Image (cartoon, rainbow, N blue to C red):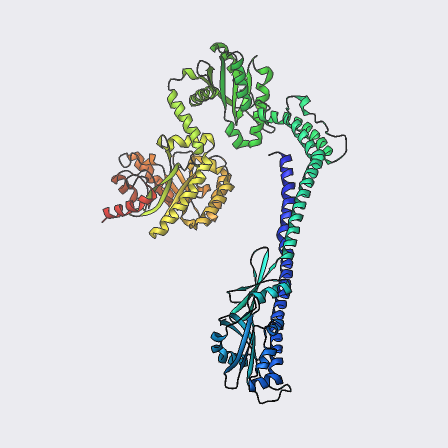
Amino acid sequence: MTLKMKTAGLIGITMAAFIILIFLFMRPVILNDAKLMDEESLETDQERVESYIESEKMDLQRFNRDWAVWDDSYTFMQNRSEAYIRSNLIQETFENSAINLMVFINTKGEVIYANGYDLTDGTELDLASSLQQVPEIIEEAENGNGLVIIEDSSFGSVMVAVDEILGSEGQGPSTGRLASGIFLDESFFNTMRNTLALDVQVVNKEAGDLKIQELDEKTLSSLIAVSDGLTLELKKDRKYYQQKSSSMNGLFLALAIATVILVVLVYYLIDMLVLSRISHLSVQLKDVDFDKAHSLEVENSRNVEDEITDLENSIQNMLISLEKAHTDVSKLAFFDQLTGLPNRFSLYKDFLKRIEKNDTSFAILFFDLDGFKRINDLYGHNSGDEVLKQIGRRLNGKSLRKGSRLYRIGGDEFILISNTTERTKLSEEIAEVMAAIQKVFNLGKVTTSISASIGVSFYPANARTLDDLLQYADVAMYAAKKNGKNHFVFYEDITDKHLYKYLLNLKNDLADAIANNEFFLEYQPIMDNKGERIQAVEALIRWNHPKEGLIAPLRFIPLAEETGMMKDIGDWVIRNAVKDLQKWNQENGQSLSLAINVSKAQLRFKKELIELIDEVLEEQEFPAHQLQIEITESDTAAEHEEIVDFINELKRRNIQVALDDFGVGTSSLYHLLELDVDIVKIDRSFLRQVPASEKDTALLKGIYSTLYDLNIQLVTEGIETEEQRDFVSAKNGSYLQGFYFSKPVLLEELKKMQEAWEKTLL
């Protein structure tokens, strides 16, 4: 959806929401006021109806009282004069007085005269059938203040007034009672409708408590109880409600029309002043191409000074900056920042250009610096970087033959593409490259030298893709390193390509082994001096390769040292071994010690190693005195003072220090005293001919005696026979370790091995 459409939609939705809110909130308030006004008007009409009926009641009672309290009526009740009847109780009397019937009753309750007329047609009424109700009528009238409404008479509903017949002055005694009545029939209510101009109907309903009802949006009704059995329904148009509703609908329509006009107007103005200019700017930006200078110019959409113009100018300045940044990024993307040489991306780009342009043959030279890691370790990474810079300067430009180009693809690895494919000439070029690398490097206070191992593959003889060519050249380079370094090897000359590919693949796979959880630990028991109980276990790392299966440590440890992975692997061993044995000790109620060998790579970062050990011991709550850190004897020759400081740091933490593979290195006994270790592990090579060889036996006895006198705990490795066990266990309390007791096992198998061994001692 475009910005224009979104803007139009937003304006329309906003205005529509505003109108709807007005309609939803104002309409109910206004219509409720109209409803109240209609109800008030209906209540007024209801009062008029009730007043009319009350007036009729009063007129009837007044008429009846005038006739009852009259000397002529009083005398008539005594003499029943026909003259009274002829002169007074004639049809005109009933019609003029709007009375339907008159009944004279003596003091005994007997009707002495009764007459009446249907005023609608003037016919005389037959009152004979209704005279039986006279006693009940009189009784109800007396209970109702002289007035009663009869609903179930033969004439329908009749309103009757009853009074005692007395003299004109009200003197008595009473000679009887006079009952006068009017019919509450359609004629009565038509007269009421015409008089009041109201819509009133007799209904068969009970008025109840709720008198006003909404029949629909146009009509209200009110129920009026004339008597218990007579209910009137008054209907009235909802004039105010309909007027307000019609007005609100008209207002809503007017607002809707005004909104449409306003939306169109606002949209037109916004489009003219903002949206069309932004759209124009967007079209220009879509055409931007940093490889075409003319496309970087942004035209102002209007000759005015406003925020949009500022935006256009800012974008123009930004494009200029981006063009410069694009140039800089291109350099960053395709050139190594340390040496200034083309990088791996440039290599791929140039390779594609070469094969697309002429598809001629060329050579890929993959070379890796020999001894570069040593420079980093001895002199620091800054010195290593300086070596790489000097190599870049030596080999780039004039030092290379025409058509050759040098690339740095990472670390101390370089690629050289050479147009020379004839072996003799190529060998000469390689010799020139190697000679340039072997020149002395001046690193400020020190000088050093290195060499290079180079592998060569040919396009298209060996492969047609760069990835394959690099892999084959890498394999050849690895073969050159294995053949003594400072050599070059052609891939096609390698007889055992599979082996070198295998080793190279292992080397590459090793980088992901920790992340993929491919390493696991086994533990070899270290027995007491009698070979009866386990005192400690040594953690040994194993690699379960997803494709190759178990890889021997003797094969992958050197690869890890070559790739610099050894430190990470050693740290992984410390974390997991301490965690595993602490859990095992807690579950089995034991307190075995743990021996872990630290590598030379870890010793180069002694401070970090100490911090790691502290962190793991605290995290796992593992007792420090149960941890043994093993240092290989040959690793103590370099950086002797730092090793001594490292050992002292461990001992301050109550961590035991063991010297591993004692006797195969170059350390002297005096050197051993300086290290102040707690444990010395006698290398297995001393035990191979013991006790068969007298010289070997005598030498081992001398070592035992000397170390015993120095109060150093011994561990003899490589015990494989019962005879060796008996010999060692008899000498000065050395702990025992070897396949005679157990091969390295998974920790979950250690308990079973322990129980099985103890059974053999019973």
Residue reaching furthest to the right: 304
* Along the line of sight, the residue nearer the viewer: 47 or 640: 47
Instruction: Tell me where residue 466 appears, x and y as whole percent.
Output: 48, 20
Instruction: Tell me where residue 498 appears, x and y as whole percent.
Output: 37, 22
In the drawing, does residue 207 fall left or right of residue 627?
A: right
Instruction: Tell me where residue 183 appears, x and y as whole percent.
Output: 55, 70
Residue name at image x 65 percent, y 30 percent: 282
Screen quadrant of the N terminus: top right
* Along the line of sight, the residue nearer the viewer: 273 or 14: 14
* Along the line of sight, the residue nearer the viewer: 459 or 71: 71
In the drawing, does residue 235 fall left or right of residue 738?
A: right
* Residue 660 is at least partly visible in this image: yes
Residue name at image x 64 percent, y 87 percent: 169
* Residue 734 is at least partly visible in this image: no
Q: Is residue 496 above or below residue 762?
A: above
Instruction: Tell me where residue 242 appears, x and y as whole percent.
Output: 63, 54
Quarter residue 259 falls in:
top right
**Number of callouts in the render?**
0
Quarter residue 681 falls in:
top left
